[in-house]
Image (tube, helix red, strand yellow):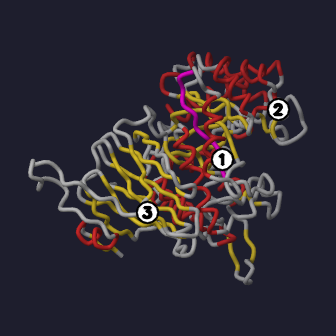
Amino acid sequence: MKKKLLSVFLAAAVGMSFAGCSGGGEDGGKEEVTVPENSIVLDIAAESNGRRMKGFGAECDPLFISENVGESGTDENGAAWECKEEDWVNVIEPRIEEINLQRMRVMLCPSYFCPTYEQYASKNYAWASEEMSSVYQVLETAQKSDITVNLTYWGVDALKCPWLAASQEGWMSFPKAEYEEAFCEMFADAVKYLKEDRGYTCIREITIFNEPNSYGFENYARICRMMNEKFIGAGLRDGVEFNLSDTAENKDWLERCAKELSDISDFLNAHTYSFGYGMTNREIYEACLDWVSRMEGCGQDLYFNEFGTNKATSSHTASDNFDPERGLEICRIAANMVNAGIVGASYWVLFSQLYNREEVGRYMDMGLWGCANEGYACRPVFYAYTLLTRFVPAGAHIYPISSADENIVAFAVRTPSGKWSYVAVNNSDEAKKLAFRNAGEAPEGSVKKYVYDVKNVPTDNRVITAYTEIGCVQEYLFDELGGQSVAVYTQL
């Protein structure tokens, strides 16, 4: 449903008086605008902070065919369900396109294409394996929608690739010392095959190891430098950014990467599940600033390759997966990240699925939507987070916003073509009057307002399409944002 609110109507609604958007004054200048009483003024500077969004994305690991198709059962109501291969084309791919996903982080393990030493030695890689079919499925979707893929070389999956693993304990291992070069060469071979032979130009960056902290920094740095040389030798380096660090909550690790690896990295990343409930906006913002401060002097951006709320109860699930509040908290965390100088984040995970079908029922269950056992139903966080994926585009210039109200966090972005999006989150229970004041080339006419309301979450498994048009008043945009709500005001 769409309603159009003209500026005159808006003025009456909020008790503001003004004569018009331009002209009309005795000196031919603009009329003075009166800001409504009790408004929270949100100033947008004339210039950006010099950073550009890399976009909001999600983890989409290639396990649908290899670990999920063929699974079946009955749901809590006794209805039968089955995960079918065509579900990808009929449900998952259209949904990815609908949410305008900017980025995907995608896992790649050595065992997918080289489970034996003989395959490496002969370069007779298993490109036709079931695991690689799952990889192609994800990359085909990304290629169609021009989604930037971060291909993360997860480590050595020890049980499935024992010849390469330094340890047989746990799921992932560092490579054996004598096979470090092979480990790097295999990945370069895989990226070259995927980009050049199969045409997946959507692979635009790589990350070496998922959460490598336990391997030791010296080992990690050595592998990264070796990988850089392999990519240069394969003619890949100019077309692939190195997104390094991938630290799990370890700021000292990030700082060492900034100091010691910035000559080969293009930007750095981290993971966090520490923010959200029980924290003020100021506390989240200052924690994010601390992350950014560890990058000082390296001249590169910080991205979060994984993030969620502080309600994770294990590596696989969180207590707030189905709570409407999770949607608000995810957007609140994201807004504070952007204001602190972080250029985007990747939600863990895009949709829930099995990572190992032998672990019956143990779903990676933090998805924006469920797997076949839930009928691929969207969780509340889907409706909130997709406001960011749709209206905060990669490449947009970032304009942080300071708020005098402890319950309001907001930021703005402007596309290279001059289109604005303002994002605001109100985590109080009361409605708040907002007055965005743009010192630059403010939007003219009207903008579309999309709202996620914790008290009125959709259940239709579609992105939020209902909007209200809000009239702009010179450099101002006035509105009232309800309690426990996220709003995007956009020209897109």
The percent position of residue 132, horizontal first and vertical second, equals 64, 44
Considering only vertical position in the picture, is 405 above or below 147? Answer: below
Task: Give the Cα separation between the discs numbered 3 and 1.
Answer: 25 Å
Task: Give the Cα separation between the discs numbered 3 and 2.
Answer: 51 Å
Label annotation for residue 38: 3
Label annotation for residue 98: none
Q: Is residue 370 visible?
A: yes
Of 86 and 492, nearer the camera is: 492
Task: Check the picture and name the quadrant holding the N terminus.
Answer: bottom left
Mark 3 or 2, nearer chain start: 3
Q: Is residue 470 left or right of residue 20?
A: right
Disc 3 + disc 2, Cβ < 8 Å: no
Q: Secondary structure at mark 2?
A: helix
Q: How many marks?
A: 3
Tag 3: Cα neighbours inside 10 Å, few (<14), some, or many (≥20)?
few
Q: Is residue 316 left or right of residue 280?
A: right
The residue that disc 2 covers is 214
The kind of residue tagged 2 is Ser
The kind of residue tagged 3 is Asn
Mark 3 or 1, nearer chain start: 3
Q: Which residues are magenta?
A: 298-308
Magenta span has 322?
no
Considering only vertical position in the picture, is 293 above or below 106? Answer: above
Tag 2: Cα neighbours inside 10 Å, few (<14), some, or many (≥20)?
few
> Mark 3 or mark 1: which is in front?
3
The percent position of residue 115, horizontal first and vertical second, equals 77, 36
Q: Residue at x 65, y 51 (%)?
A: 348
Q: Is residue 402 left or right of residue 221?
A: left
The residue that disc 1 covers is 283
Tag 1: Cα neighbours inside 10 Å, few (<14), some, or many (≥20)?
some
Q: Residue at x 41, y 68 (%)?
A: 465
Of 21 and 287, nearer the camera is: 21
